[in-house]
Amino acid sequence: MKVAIFQFYLFGINTYVVYDPATLCCAVIDPGMLGPKEEKAITDFISNNNLKVTHIINTHLHLDHAIGNGFLKETYNVPVLASKADEPLGKRMQEQAMMFGINEKFKGVEITDYLTDGEIIKIGDGELQVIAVPGHSLGSVALYDKKDGFLIAGDALFKGSIGRTDLPGGNYYQLIDSIKTKLLTLPGDTVVYPGHGEPTTIADEKKMNPFLR
């Protein structure tokens, strides 16, 4: 599968469109669009490439990764996937916004289907494996494409860093364990697409990430 990257305003969130070029099916992962200009960037890419949206997937339900769920659901009427453990966060979008001094009105996220550890999500002929990586939030997951060698890591693992653990549901020791036992065991050449910042690889993070030594 192919990965298209969009960086949006709210906290520099990376939103991903993962698509199967053979069937043109796609999933939007961590929709962080805020406002018409950013919404148009996603919809234009989808329409210009003749893609068919089959899923909206959230690695977790912190505000910056989930604010575009409502717009995409209304536009494409497809399932919204997230972990059940993050459902309380999804219902508190407005409360989360107030914590960061954001005045826009956000609806709660209505999860259509719950993600489970080890589950395979089919996107056309492609597959994403759900990997539970709690620690940044209770229900954080990563999404692994074994065939094409990439990982959508959400806010678990960054280039040279890890996700925050001072937000509700965060636990530093749990996150470190999740990364070491679930992510660093993947092949070293696996490309890691994080929730913020630049891509990296599993090998580079094993070697150079100061939090994982």
Image: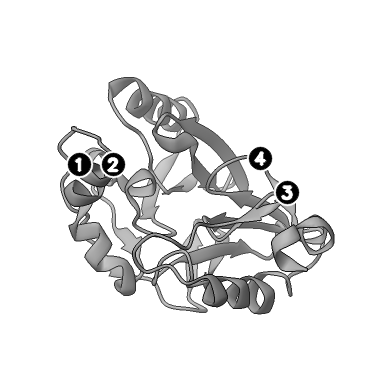
Q: Amino acid at mark 4?
A: Glu
Q: Earlier in the sequence, mark 2 or mark 4?
A: 2
Q: Secondary structure at mark 2?
A: helix
What separation in Å lies between label 3 and label 2 (alpha carbons)? 28 Å
Q: Residue at x 18, y 50 (%)?
A: 95
Residue bearing the label numbered 1: 74
Instruction: Please say if the residues under marks 1 and 2 sit with CB atoms less than 8 Å apart.
Output: yes
Q: Secondary structure at mark 4?
A: loop
Specify the label residue 108 is tagged with: none
Q: Position of residue 151 (x, y in %)?
A: 63, 58
At which x and y percent is residue 114?
Answer: 32, 71
Q: CA distance from mark 3 to mark 4?
A: 7 Å
CA–CA distance between discs 1 and 4?
30 Å
Query: Which label is found at residue 200?
Result: 3
Where residue 198 is drawn, which disc sits there?
4
- Between label 3 and label 1, give the one nearer the viewer: 3
**Picture layout, residue 132 above or below residue 189:** below
Q: Given contact means CB atoms under 8 Å apart, are the residues at marks 2 and 4 in contact?
A: no
Q: In the rendered image, which residue does mark 2 sit on?
A: 72
Q: Are marks 3 and 1 in contact (CB under 8 Å)?
A: no
Q: Is residue 97 left or right of residue 210?
A: left
Q: Residue 55, percent across and down?
A: 37, 54
SS type, badge 3? strand
